[in-house]
Amino acid sequence: MAKSKIRKKSKIKAYSKSKSRANSAAITGIERVARPQAQTQSASKKRTAIVAAVSCALGFALGATLYFTVLRPTPADLATDEPTPIVNDLLEGVTDPDVRELLLKFPLDVPEEFDDLEQRIKPFSSNGLDEAGRWAGVRALDCVNFGDVDFDDFEFPHYVHTVTDLEVVERMMLLMEDEQYAPEYVEVFDRAIKKDDFVNIEFIGSIDGVPFDGGSSFDENGKSKGGVEVVAGSNDFIDDFLTQIIGHKPGDTFEVNVTFPKDYSEVFPDTEGFFDGKDASFEVTINFILEEEDQDDYVRRLFYGIFGWENTEDYKAGLHEIMVRDRFDDFIGKVIHEDVVVTIPASLRELAVNNVIKMHQNRAANSNYSTLSNYMTVAMTIPEPSMRALVKASLPQIEMQLKAQLVFQALAELWEIEATHEDIGAYLDAHPGSTDYNEIVEEAGLPWLKQEAAGWRVRQRIVGNAALLDPPTL
């Protein structure tokens, strides 16, 4: 197959009576859409962004587990589009006296020490952790009451541990709808056009042998603008224009004859009835056909460097494994937050808050915001930036993740689990592509990595010893 460069798919808007367009493109009933341009970013940032975005698209529930904490830095450009909930009275709805006292500690204005974007504090995620990766001076078993929950004899309902092939395919389609993971198109020159092909064409239109304004894909000087991308056999152009290109090959130049609708001026009033019902002739040249890239090529391009997937079968199997793991983690997190009683030491809450502040400072600096205040206004949608507002916006996530951390540390204490270098390797193998060992240690510190690895071991023990229940009887 003859191919050249790969490009993104563009979308063509159909001719419609519901829209009135007075520009030159209105004559043919189409609107030319610019192709998206690739973003440039460093390889490390791009790799991290890809993994984070895939995690989001796949529905990872890492926030409910130990191995993804509020302390881990994340690129600001991956922030949610949803506004951060902020109220005018920062203490409204806060009943926990420790939390109220914590909020009152922070001044109304951003402290200078945190607004200095040149001040980079590394590592910050290991603050408060001892060399073993546990909260220093905290015995988590004293902070947790498991009640009736037995994590050594856990049960997963059938819907949790079962993912169907249809669900995997739906997840694949969901990813493809994301512009970042959309398939790319390859220019093809060696076959005839078929119905529904995506085709790049050039054309010059005339009525009674006289070219008319807006009837050409070229500019006013007769130079090509790169062609127009259309769907063969569709009604994006007037009459059966795009049906007549079927069967032709790239490089062909031929004549297409069409008749304008009698009510054309109702859709495009500025034409003043000039085209209504008239016959037109177009000289058309086929530049190339655009074919969606091979599925295995798609997988290798997007996922080999991250997950090692080489073909579609690897892709399906890998997604299946991730989706099952995600459901396990969702269910464990649900049990932790609903059925386990956890007391969060005030010292840990304050430590986590300070780490979150430093995390946001790093996000602001990495994303080139002028000040931390500007970052809070734009990226976090905090209308009146203040450190207390930032803290309050972060508190729900802080509370959830500290609770999960204490439960996982309590289980590590109970089962005498302490992360080894082998555990760190297993943890990194299970979460490929986001970064390497040295980058994590530089950004977050070795204690944080040990905390994550110990949490991974705890999670693996829970899942490995659990009973997988059969579907309920109807």
Image: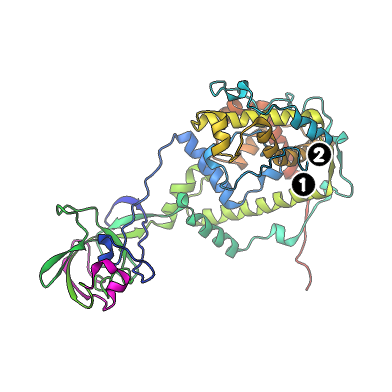
The answer to which of 81 and 303 lies nearer the viewer is: 81
Label 2 is placed on what type of residue? Leu
Instruction: Report the residue at 32% width, 61% height from top.
Output: 31
**Labels 1 & 2 near each other (Cβ < 8 A):** yes
The answer to which of 445 and 392 lies nearer the viewer is: 392
Other-residue count near label 1 (Cα within 10 Å), few / some / many at <14 / 14–19 / ≥20 = many
- What residue is disc 2 on? 411
Quarter placement of the C terminus? bottom right
Residue 215 placement, left or right of 237: left
Quarter placement of the N terminus? bottom left
**Is tag 1's residue or tag 2's residue first in the polypeptide sequence?**
2
Q: What colour scheme does the image use?
A: rainbow
Q: Is residue 408 above or below residue 20?
A: above
- What residue is disc 1 on? 462
Q: Is residue 170 visible?
A: yes
Instruction: Report the residue at 66% width, 48% height from top.
Output: 61
Label 1 is placed on what type of residue? Ile
| Residue 113 badge | none
Give how far across and how far down residue 190 sits, in percent: 24, 61
Instruction: Report the residue at 42% width, 55% height from top.
Output: 183
Q: Is residue 136 above or below residue 297?
A: above
Q: Is residue 434 visible?
A: no
Give how far across and how far down residue 100 sits, in percent: 79, 34
Give how far across and how far down residue 81 sits, in percent: 56, 47
Mark-to-mark CA distance, 1 and 2: 10 Å
- Chain part drawn in magenta: 246-273
